[in-house]
Image (tube, rainbow, N blue to C red):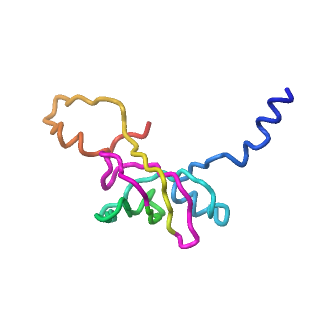
Amino acid sequence: MGVALVSMGGLGENLIFYWTPTEMKAAGEKAYGATVRLGGQVVEGSIERDEKSTKLSFRVGDGETQFPVDAQGMPPAMFREKIGVVIEGTLLRSGRFASNRLMVKHDNEYRAPGEEDVDTKALMKTTEGLAAP
């Protein structure tokens, strides 16, 4: 019992919150400096890549609120506009989200073309319209 209490004593300090952009905005002061997983969709037309470095900038939104993101490192191969992402990092006082980890959300469910004429390659290029897991 004592070991469990000791091991759980610092648990609150090590939690990582998962928020949408709207939830992060509503968190106010609590959002600044905290390690957060921010989930949303990459806003169309917002991706900027620095060819000289591994810096990537884009906006992530949830339909109501958007935040500018600065991510370091190579993005996953599936990264593109309108795809769901989860980014881990910190909201800075400048209002920008500094990310050190970028994950692409995708559906693991295979969808074979139905009776209607479906462009399978087009389906593979987007997650738009897929139901959330």
Return the residue nearer the eye: 25 or 90: 90
Can you give x and y, in whole percent of width and height, for residue 130 in the image?
34, 41
Q: Which residues are magenta?
A: 71-95
- Whether the magenta-drawn stretch holds residue 88 is answered as yes
Quadrant containing the C terminus is: top left
Return the residue nearer the eye: 64 or 54: 54
Left or right: where 114 falls relative to 89? left
Most extreme residue toward the left, as rendered? 117
Q: Quadrant of residue 58?
A: bottom left
Left or right: where 29 falls relative to 131? right
Most extreme residue toward the front, as rendered? 52
Can you give x and y, in whole percent of width and height, for residue 26 in the image?
61, 62
Can you give x and y, in whole percent of width and height, for residue 37 in the image?
54, 50
Residue at image location 17% in from the left, 40% down from the top: 121
Can you give x and y, in whole percent of width and height, for residue 7 in the image?
77, 35
Q: Give the main secondary structure, helix, strand or loop, of the magenta stretch.
A: loop
Left or right: where 55 falls relative to 118? right
Q: Quadrant of residue 28?
A: bottom right
Residue at image location 28% in from the left, 64% down from the top: 51
Most extreme residue toward the top, as rendered? 1
Residue at image location 46% in from the left, 64% down from the top: 66
How many numbered discs, if any?
Answer: 0
Return the residue nearer the eye: 132 or 74: 74
Most extreme residue toward the right, as rendered? 2
Image height check: is 53 above or below 131?
A: below
Quadrant containing the N terminus is: top right
Q: Quadrant of residue 50?
A: bottom left
Residue at image location 50% in from the left, 61% down from the top: 98
